[in-house]
Image (cartoon, rainbow, N blue to C red):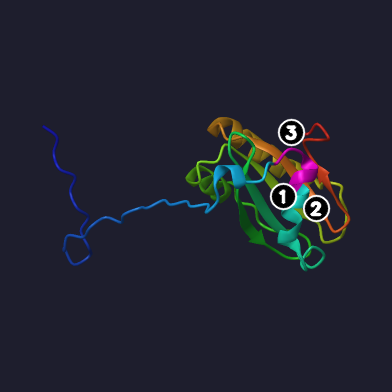
Amino acid sequence: MAKPIPKPMSNDGEEKEPAEIRVTYSSGLKMSERPMVSSSMSAYEMVKRYFDGTMEAHESFVVLLVDRGNRLKGVYRHSTGGLHGTVADPKLVFAVALKTLSSAMILVHNHPSGQLRPSEEDIRLTKKFVEAGKFLDLPVNDHLIVTAEGYYSFADQGMI
């Protein structure tokens, strides 16, 4: 017979209830109403509005989360940084993707300089996310670098 799990004790010796963890997700859209992410261009068109007014001001990192049919489940605004970078924490990004039961993701960040060429750090970060996605069976379909005038797709360039 299994023993009951003991309750945590506070510093004053009082029994406390452990924290309850709740995970929720609600899209508000029917599956048929979700837009299809069919190419890097369609991903760019969907996401560029999330950079309106800030594309050339500071760097931001956004994630498009998709289902098995490549329909957009949601957009996760992960971080906002300065002129030369922002933090992209794989643990947090994958936590959101897993919590929303997403099947894949598209990473997106902007370059305020207007430069579409990926930096060495962009390449390292993409490889890190791709490897983690393989392990979790939650693939990174693409990583876009976006500017007001266009985008660079890691997938289109054979880098994913």
In the picture provided, is 63 more to the left or to the right than 113? left
- Sequence order check, earlier mark of 1 and 3: 1
Element under label 2? strand
Q: Quadrant of the C terminus?
A: top right
User: Can residue 119 be found in the magenta stretch?
Assistant: no
* Disc ID at residue 160: 3
Element under label 1? strand
Tell me the residue at 41%/51% (across/down): 23
Query: Which numbered disc, 3 or 2, marks the residue closer to the eye?
Result: 2
Q: Where is residue 77 in the image (x, y as percent from the top left)?
A: 63, 57
- Sequence order check, earlier mark of 3 and 2: 2
Q: Mark 1 points at which residue?
A: 108
Crowd band around label 3 with a 10 angstrom C-alpha radius: few (<14), some (14–19), many (20+): some
Count of labels shown? 3
In the picture provided, is 146 more to the left or to the right than 11? right
Q: Name the residue nearer the viewer: 143 or 126.
A: 143
Tell me the residue at 62%/34% (across/down): 69
Tell me the residue at 80%/52% (across/down): 146
Q: Position of residue 25 (x, y in %)?
A: 47, 51
Element under label 3? loop
In the picture provided, is 159 more to the left or to the right than 62? right
Crowd band around label 1 with a 10 angstrom C-alpha radius: few (<14), some (14–19), many (20+): many
Amino acid at the residue labelled 3: Ile
* Disc ID at residue 146: 2
Amino acid at the residue labelled 1: Val
Q: Name the residue nearer the viewer: 4 or 158.
A: 158
Crowd band around label 2 with a 10 angstrom C-alpha radius: few (<14), some (14–19), many (20+): many
Q: Position of residue 58 (x, y in %)?
A: 76, 65
Q: Are marks 2 and 1 in contact (CB under 8 Å)?
A: yes
Residue range (magenta)? 37-43
